[in-house]
């Protein structure tokens, strides 16, 4: 099976949180958290269309400036999501600069604040100097916050002494092309395959026509002959919260059946009390969440700098509770 969602930690697990998720075949990427982004090359930053921020502590939000600096002159819209207070934090970042010479720049930032039953959304246009626009209140009947052809995103709000968002990104289904059919029919590879994928994922009409090697086919025929559908991948991302029963229950529901769960583990189990005081997790608590949620793989990050050189102990402690693979994908 060809993996479509390719997530990795941007930084060493002892450094700031950020996960970059490339969607294969698409010039589009998703970012979870905006920690320090110096390890991401400009070409990767330019692909980011969606950003999901857990909360605005400085280690999760300081990368906003680097992202903005890279995309400032680009003709694109970046969609940013975060918990209560997020719109003020985005406004505050933008208000920190002077924007009198950017009137011809087409960049748009759309920011959405996630509450338990509502989304609050506003848009900042670079051409207007990112001036405040009206805020729309959007009803949110369930945990869904975004639906796109290639993926949907769900969120839960957990307690980190402040509201903190956790995310689940899922493919609607996974589409495979049958190579043997491509070969047998002598159909050349090319952009039409990505177009076909996009058309199927976005629910385009079955009679939409594609021309391949000079012949016309409908989407329905190509789908039937050329593709196989299997369940989509699910990526979970959770960082900075107290291991309370309420938080663990909420996250177990949100993250059920994740293929990869990215979960913070600030502390080793010897610091369980400190973890509780600061509303962070230990490696064992992250592993408990992964086990309860039935995750297939666990990636740990956000290790406390005081434990530098002891990364192996985090994996060992987690491995005693969670039986799937535990590591750091950097
Ligand atoms: Zn943090
Ligand atoms: Zn925090």
Image (tube, helix red, strand yellow):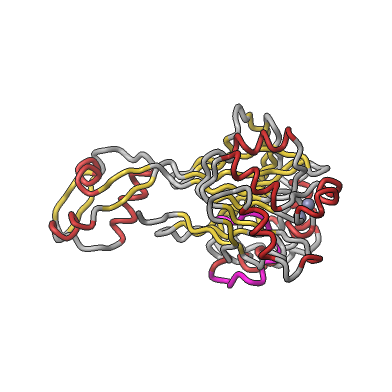
Quarter holding the N terminus is: bottom left
Q: Position of residue 90 (x, y in %)?
A: 74, 52
Asked whether 39 falls inside the magenta stretch, the response is yes
Q: Is residue 214 left or right of residue 107?
A: left
Q: Position of residue 84 (x, y in %)?
A: 76, 40
Left or right, 169 with reference to 117: left
Which residues are the magenta region? 30-43
Quadrant where the image shows the C terminus: bottom right
What's the residue at 64%, 57% (across, down)?
Answer: 300
124, above or below 102, in the image: above
Q: Which residue corresponds to the image point at 46% horizontal and 47% vertical from the top-left?
A: 233
Return the x and y of residue 40 as percentages of the image width and height.
Answer: 60, 69
Q: Is residue 303 visible?
A: yes
Farthest front residue? 320
Asked if the magenta segment contains residue 277, the reply would be no
Residue at image x 63%, y 71%? 39
Answer whether residue 110 is visible to the viewer in this image: no
- Magenta residues, dominant SS class: loop
Relative to 136, say whether 71 is above or below. below
Task: Determine the residue positioned at 71% across, 40% down.
Answer: 134
Of residues 281 and 141, the one drawn nearer to the viewer in this rendering: 281
Horizontal side of 142 relative to 274 (left or right) equals left
Note whether 146 is above or below 176 in the view shown: above
Residue 179 pos. (x, y %) = 23, 57
Front in this rendered view, residue 193 or 284: 284
Q: Depth check: 110 or 104 in front?
A: 110
């Amino acid at each position: 099976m060809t993996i479509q969602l390719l997530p990795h930690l941007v930084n060493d697990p002892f450094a700031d949180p950020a996960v970059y998720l490339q969607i294969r075949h698409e010039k589009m990427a998703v970012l979870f958290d905006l920690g320090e982004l110096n390890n991401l090359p400009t070409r990767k930053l330019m692909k980011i269309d969606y950003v999901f921020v857990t909360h605005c502590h400085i280690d999760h939000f300081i990368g906003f400036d680097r992202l903005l600096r890279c995309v400032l002159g680009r003709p694109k819209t970046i969609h940013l999501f975060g918990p209560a207070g997020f719109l003020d934090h985005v406004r505050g970042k933008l208000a920190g600069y002077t924007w009198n010479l950017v009137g011809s720049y087409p960049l748009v930032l759309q920011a959405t604040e996630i509450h338990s039953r509502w989304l609050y959304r506003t848009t900042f246009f670079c051409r207007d100097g990112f001036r405040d626009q009206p805020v729309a209140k959007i009803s949110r009947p369930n945990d869904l916050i975004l639906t796109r052809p290639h993926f949907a995103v769900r969120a839960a709000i957990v307690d980190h002494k402040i509201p903190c968002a956790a995310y689940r990104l899922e493919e609607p289904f996974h589409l495979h092309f049958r190579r043997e059919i491509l070969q047998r029919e002598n159909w050349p590879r090319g952009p039409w395959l990505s177009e076909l994928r996009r058309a199927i994922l976005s629910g385009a009409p079955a009679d939409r026509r594609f021309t391949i090697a000079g012949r016309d086919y409908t989407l329905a025929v190509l789908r039937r002959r050329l593709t196989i559908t299997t369940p989509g991948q699910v990526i979970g991302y959770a960082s900075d919260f107290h291991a309370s029963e309420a938080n663990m229950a909420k996250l177990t529901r949100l993250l059920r059946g994740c293929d990869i769960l990215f979960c913070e583990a600030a502390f080793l189990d010897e610091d369980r009390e400190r973890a509780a005081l600061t509303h962070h997790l230990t490696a064992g608590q992250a592993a408990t969440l992964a086990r309860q949620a039935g995750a297939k793989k666990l990636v740990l990050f956000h290790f406390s700098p005081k434990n530098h050189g002891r990364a192996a102990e985090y994996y060992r402690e987690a491995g005693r509770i969670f039986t799937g693979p535990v590591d750091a994908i950097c």
